[in-house]
Image (cartoon, rainbow, N blue to C red):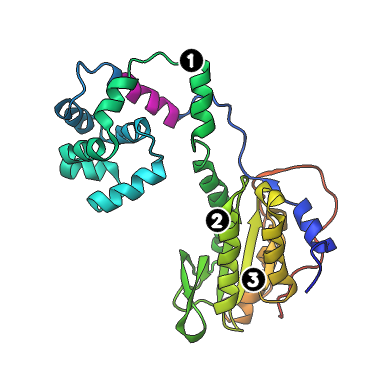
Amino acid sequence: MTGPDTGAMQAYLGRLRRLTTHVAVDESSEQADAIVAAGASLGELDEISVESLTRWVRDRPADVYALGLSVGLSQEKLKNLLRVAFGTTSWVKAVAADARGVVVWLDEEFGLLETLEAQRHRTYTFGDVLAARGTSRQTASRAGVAGKLIEDAVEQIVRDLGLPYEMRGRFVGRNGDTGPADLAVPGFDDALIAVACKGFDSTGSKLTAAVTEVMDMANVSFAHQYVLAVVDGIGWLSRQGDFRRMHALLEQHRIDGLYALADLDAFRADLHAAAVRHGLLEGPLPDGPGVSVPGEALAARVEKPDAQLHLDL
């Protein structure tokens, strides 16, 4: 196994890009405007009761999220709890099926009525605002944006090459075991190429989970199945131990390619070569416009990617 400070790994870390842009905390957005409008509407209610809130959610089903926020539920947590209580992650569908039941559930489980009554006319200080920002998960949704940015870039390359594919599932490998993949060619049941798309600008356990997913892909794949990973985002700079484990998979030839977004041209070439090897495509790599690289480079760099791809073609 190559040491942790190999030139190839350090060069890769140097090519990482910032995937999400900074958004000022007071900058307007469609979601923020909707929350403000919902809060204003709640403040105008003559009374807070099960009946008044039932009428409110019927009139404004999309704003149930604001009720969740008032009792400290993030969007993801609200969705997960709704799935258990109402069999759907959509608060709009839950309200359509049982508006009163949603209100009663929020009150019985989280004290909605008392919380709203106490909060809706309270005067908040700047310290209260800072405390709310410091204890919230308001930027968590942007992690999904980073991952989707990589998925979209990879999917566009696959489409441009004319390959059949499926998105987000589990591909079948050795002994009938399955492994996770963000994209599989031609599909998950008969995967010949499995691709992981992992992008994070923030840090945390989700990066460890992403490495585990790529390791699972390597562990279950047949020798004839190509495992490629497109991994980027500045969050890896703070989790180099996790990234080192993933890069080791490449060094040990347990995966066939590891690419930053700056390497998308190389990814396109290797994907085409693997598809030709499996008879999914014919002929040389077609000419095309340069692959558009999303995200923001941290600094100007002139070095080319080190020899790091191990497709045996």
Residue at 38%, 38% in the rendered image: 73
Q: Amino acid at mark 3?
A: His
Residue 261 lies in the magenta stretch: no
Q: Quadrant of residue 99?
A: top left
State the separation of the CA atoms marked 3 and 2.
Answer: 17 Å
Circle nearer the viewer, 2 or 1: 1
| Residue wearing tag 3 | 272
Question: Where in the figure is residue 198, as x and y percent of width and height?
Answer: 59, 57
SS category of the residue bearing label 1: loop
| Residue wearing tag 1 | 125
Q: Main secondary structure of the magenta part?
A: helix
Residue 70 visible at all: yes
| Residue wearing tag 2 | 151
Q: Amino acid at mark 1?
A: Thr
Q: Quadrant of residue 278?
A: bottom right
Query: Which of the two labelled residues, at mark 2 and mark 1, occupies the earlier sequence position?
Result: 1
Label drawn at residue 66: none
SS category of the residue bearing label 2: helix
Instruction: Check contact, mark 3 vs mark 1: CB within 8 A.
Output: no
Residue 31 lies in the magenta stretch: yes
Start and end of the magenta stretch?
30-40
State the separation of the CA atoms marked 2 and 1.
Answer: 41 Å
